[in-house]
Amino acid sequence: MQPGNQNRLGYAVAGYTSFLQHILEKENVMALGIVGLILIAIGGLLSLVAFVCAIIVIVKMFQANETGLGVGTILGLFLCAPVGYILAIVYGLKNKVAWKLETIMPIFIGSFVLGFLFVLPGYVLFFFSMAGDIQTQMRMQQNQMQMQMDENPMPDIEMPEIEIPEIEIPQPAPQQ
């Protein structure tokens, strides 16, 4: 990496961490969690629309006697969702005229992409709000412990002196 790029990367990381610190220092981080949950809900609804469109494409696969492709898409949808969605999108676009999917495919692609774009920042915001809540709880616990220590200070305890006897280590006998 070139020296100029290292400086830019350092500035970017410093700016990002100061932004996160600014967010987490707010007294009311609950608003971040609420916004995150709203984004997750919108993304979930869009993902549900994409799921329904994927099912429609899978039905069209079976109607066109593409049984293996339909089964593979179903398995991909439930075992590894991106694989199933990508298979449904690719083969739906490839055969949209023959399978009469001209109106479904733009809805499918748009809801799939927008669902992802809403859910991802929603989880990020929700995570930051949870981190802020944890940080606030830790501060409250520290303050509570400090108040308890101020109310009930530890008594001075005198430790008795303990004498440690010296141990004589025997020397090995000389070998002949």
Image: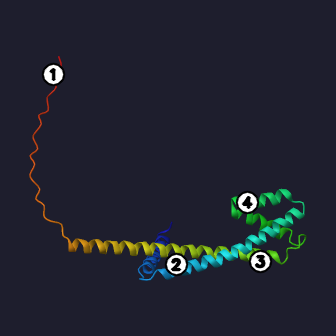
Helix, strand or loop at label 3? It is helix
Residue 38 in the figure: left or right of residue 1: right
Q: Is residue 64 left or right of residue 149?
A: right
Task: Give the labeled residue for mark 1.
Answer: 174
Q: How is the image coloured?
A: rainbow
Q: Earlier in the sequence, mark 1 or mark 3?
A: 3
Q: Label 4 neighbourhood size at 10 Å, few (<14), some (14-19), many (20+)? A: some
Q: Which mark is residue 76?
A: 4
Cα–Cα span, label 4 and label 3: 20 Å
Per the image, label 1 sits on a secondary structure element best described as: loop
* CB atoms of marks 1 and 4 within 8 Å: no
Which image quadrant is residue 91 in? Answer: bottom right
For disc 3, the marked residue is 107
Vertically, is 144 above or below 70? below
Residue for badge 2: 33
Q: Amino acid at mark 1?
A: Pro
Q: Position of residue 154 (x, y in %)?
A: 18, 66
First in residue order: circle 4 vs circle 3:
4
Cα distance between the residues tagged 2 and 1:
78 Å
Name the element at disc 4: helix
Q: Is residue 116 visible?
A: yes
In this rendered view, identify the residue nearer to me: 170 or 13.
Answer: 170
Residues under labels 1 and 4: Cα distance? Answer: 79 Å
For image coordinates 76% across by 74% down, the residue present is 108
* Gap in angstroms between the C-alphas marked 2 and 3: 29 Å
Q: Would you say the residues marked 2 and 3 are in contact, meaning their CB atoms lie under 8 Å apart?
A: no
Please state which amino acid type lies under the numbered disc 4.
Answer: Gly
Task: Give the class, few, some or many, for how many residues have Cα within 10 Å of label 1's Cα (few <14, many ≥20).
Answer: few
How far is the residue under mark 1 from the one under mark 3?
94 Å
